[in-house]
Image (cartoon, rainbow, N blue to C red):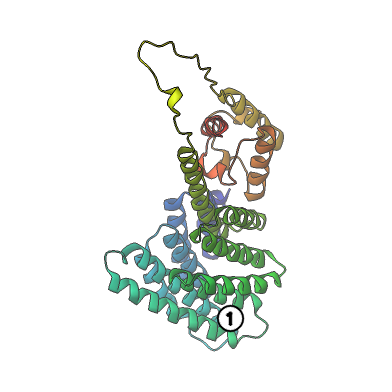
Amino acid sequence: MWYEAQEVYKEVGDKTREALAWYSIAEVHSVTRQHDAALYAQEQSLLLWKQVGNDRGIVKAMFNLADLYLLLKNHTESEKLVLQLGRYTHAANDARAKDEMSRQILFLRVCLLARANEGEQNPRLGGEMLDKALRAANKALKLVQDMEDAPLCRGKAVLSRAEVLLASGLLDQAVMLAEEAKRCFQTVKDDAGQAGEALAMALIATVLFQKEELREANRLATDAVQLACSCQDWKAERRCVEVLTSVEKALQATVISVQYQGLPAVAADTLVVPGAPQPTVAVVQRVGVDVEVANKKLISMMIQMFDAEEDIHLDTDVLETGLDSLSSLELVGRLGKEFKGVHLSPTLLFDFPCIREIGQHIHEASLQD
């Protein structure tokens, strides 16, 4: 639909509406993780905003492009955009002050990503990036002090400083600031406040993860993902999902380690003696959920949700059938109730996009203790 709109606006020469159409196309591709297509669409949007001379459109497109590059772990391109944004964010009015605060937070995250990408090979660079990130956090907080009634902005600035403390290994201080940011976000009764609260919870979950408090980290990260999904903020959702995925992998590794270490010792009277009759041991093999049953149940649920039986088959990409974040969580929840005892992550539909892969995963998950 948005591609059709973009073509219509292009034909009539309406560059403003065409830029908005490209922005919407980029958002759709970002949600479905088609990153190359999202980058192209956002670049087209930026180009058109520059042609019509719309500074607000230019700033928004640049921020979105930088976020996409950060998502792709490309700190170099993100940094270029931070520098370009400086031309548009230095002004005395409140709107520009908020943009400059956002630019400082963006630069902070660029520095932390550069440190993560190159700091191990170049410790000196890693230290410099951490110092720059801290200075950017301080600038963001100073800008907030000059704003009137801006709990959302304060929450963002405080949370950004918590990110730097987390990267510095100051875990307790990071949690204190994340809790403060969470309280700020809770006073903002809209989707932006909920997205910020979810990110604060994800940061606290990260600290718990680093302290090896995995079960509490898993609970908090799961709540963060659900909150981010409920406000349909794909950026917050993606960051929360990354935290949850790391925690779940660590939990799974812990379970496997405990199971391995918990094997019973071999008693002397159970040693095998050549020529002696051996007792018969019954081996119980778990069957698990049948793949075909899982596939059929998933298709049946999707038919009920979308009433489109002819369009749903084993190779259907579930995320391209019209599911948004809330309905994705609802579908995973229904599957969890149907196949009791099988652990299904909230990120199931992102990790296993098509029905065939989801059914196979449900079968494999049902074989685990």
Which quadrant: the C terminus? top right
Q: Secondary structure at mark 1?
A: helix
* Near-viewer residue (59 or 33): 33
Where does the image place residue 250, in percent across and percent down from the top left? 48, 49
Residue sitting nearer the eye, 290 or 305: 290
Q: With respect to residue 298, does 29 lie above or below?
A: below
In the image, what residue occupies the spot 52% across and 39% down? 353
Q: Is residue 183 left or right of residue 36?
A: right
**What residue does disc 1 label?**
95
Residue 129, how many percent across, how many down? 36, 74
Q: Examine the rendered structure and indicate whether residue 344 appears above or below residue 52.
A: above
Count residues near mark 1 (Cα–Cα under 10 Å), then give few for <14, some for 14-19, many for 20+: few
Classify 26 as above or below 321.
below
* Front residue of this view, candidates 121 and 331: 121
Count of labels shown?
1
Q: In terms of image quadrants, where is residue 227? A: bottom right
Q: Position of residue 211 (x, y in %)?
A: 50, 61
**Residue at the spot x=58%, y=81% of the render?**
95
Task: Please state which amino acid type lies under the numbered disc 1.
Answer: Ala
Residue 24 in view of the camera: no
Residue at the far left: name it: 121
Left or right: 36 as drawn, with respect to 96: left
Tell me: residue 353, above or below residue 120: above
Asked whether the viewer can see residue 323, the reply is yes
User: x and y percent of residue 271 in the render?
Assistant: 41, 23
Does residue 128 appear left or right of residue 9 in this picture?
A: left
> In which image quadrant can residue 334 be found?
top right
